[in-house]
Amino acid sequence: MKRLYKELMTILVLLAISTTSSLGGGKLIIPVESPVIPIPIDINTYIGVGLITSGVVRVCECTITRVLKDTTYGASVRAGWNYNDFLALEARWVNAPLERDFSTTKHYGLFIKPQYKVIPKMNVYTVFGYGHSEIEGAGDKNYNTLIKNGFSYGGGVEYNLFGGWSAFVDYQNLFYGEGVFDLHTNILSVGLQYNF
């Protein structure tokens, strides 16, 4: 009987220990729901349009070396996203078919845009990235098109006017010593931009 009593007490003690340890000391814990606070998201995007001039220089190794120059005019569109005050991602499209002598310029690309506020209303910036450029009249023969997919770079200045509007002046290099005619092409654009 003593032995039965000992075994019964051991079972009861083990049962009591296992019950209290599974309930965390017997306390019932009710989870507290914390309120979800929305984080404001500032999209910080912009879009701009501009007028451009495209300068094309071509070296012709004909019977004598001749340097041919052409200036065309057109329009540009750019849209971007400011990651922060110092860095943006920008897409550009350019078409310069007006006042052509021997060339027209088309270009589009995606660029990284490091920028710095010189004064509260003015940014200076550089752009570099990957683009697709076509210069008609600059290929292997006089009227072929030279096409390049690759690196392009430039820089500019933006000045905040009022509201979300700003003005910009921008320079971009498309070709430098490309093709059989040692082609050089640069774009200068002036325009307005709206910052959302």
Image: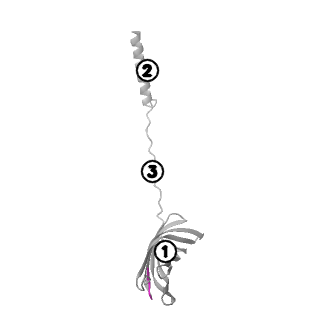
Sequence order check: which comes first, mark 2 or mark 3? 2
Residue 21 placement (x, y as % from top left)? 44, 29
- Residue matched to label 2: 13
Q: Amino acid at mark 1?
A: Gln
Mark 1 nearby-residue class (10 Å; few <14, some 14–19, many ≥20): many
- Residue matched to label 3: 36
Instruction: Tell me the element at label 2.
Output: helix
* Prevailing secondary structure of the magenta residues: loop
Which circle, 2 or 3, is nearer the viewer?
2
Sequence order check: which comes first, mark 2 or mark 1? 2
- Residue matched to label 1: 193
Sequence order check: which comes first, mark 1 or mark 3? 3
Residue 170: in magenta span = no
Q: Amino acid at mark 2?
A: Val
Q: Which residues are magenta?
A: 101-105
Q: Residue at x 54, y 71 (%)?
A: 126
Is 186 above or below relative to 22?
A: below
Residue 38 placement (x, y as % from top left)? 45, 55
Instruction: Tell me the element at label 3.
Output: loop
Q: Residue at x 42, y 30 (%)?
A: 22
Question: 51 or 24: which is nearer to us?
Answer: 51
- Separation (CA) of disc 2 from disc 3: 45 Å
- Separation (CA) of disc 1 from disc 3: 36 Å
Is 196 above or below relative to 36?
A: below
- Separation (CA) of disc 2 from disc 1: 79 Å
What kind of colouring is applied to the model shown? one colour
What is the total number of numbered labels drawn onto the structure image?
A: 3
Q: Amino acid at mark 3?
A: Val
Residue situated furthest top in the rendering = 1
